[in-house]
Image (cartoon, rainbow, N blue to C red):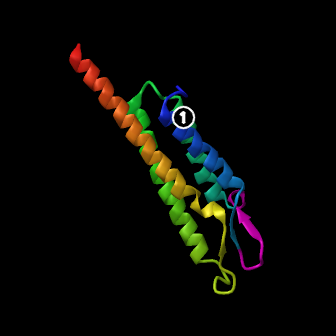
Amino acid sequence: MIQRIQSVYLLIVAILAGLGIYSPLWINDKLIIVKGFDNIYILALFASVIVLSVLSIFLYNNRKLQFVLVRFNILINIILLGVFGYYTQTLSGETLVSEKEIGLIIPFVSIVFLYLTNTAIKKDEDLVKSVDRLR
């Protein structure tokens, strides 16, 4: 299970999402650092990324379902990017204080690792199909 490279990628995504909950995302107009757990929508999206990643790790026997869940996880990360874009563009006092923090790039990095996960799952599926042809 963990010896497969896609399991390592999924574990990295789960760790990144966990860090996203506690990492600073942006600084608002009152100079307060906003973190992932300060907003319920961002917290729910990060939590769903963690749950889907961990669930996908344990679905190593069912590669097709694992492939679909990873694609859904990519979709959730894209929605998370949209939520980040919405909140950072509609901040009051955005012209006065425009300081984004490191937590905003976590979904980008997660999408890259999830794409690598899907390529590894596809490679495993092709390998299994080629072995079945030889029987």
* Residue 58, x across and y down, in percent: 53, 29
The vertical placement of 123 against 79, above or below, is: above
Q: Quadrant of residue 119?
A: top left
Disc 1 marks which residue? 55
Q: Is residue 109 above or below residue 102?
A: above
Q: Nearer the viewer, residue 55 or 1?
A: 1
Image point (53%, 40%), residue name? 10
Task: Tell me: residue 16, above or below residue 100.
Answer: above
Viewer-proximal residue among 113 and 62 = 113
Give the magenta part as a residue range: 28-38
Picture quarter with the C terminus? top left
Q: Magenta stretch: residue 74 in it?
A: no
Q: Position of residue 2 (x, y in %)?
A: 55, 28
Residue 107, image x, y percentages? 54, 56
Q: Is residue 78 visible?
A: yes
Name the residue located 52 percent from the left edge and 58 percent from the top edge. Answer: 108
Q: At x 41% / y 41%, what residue is drawn?
A: 118
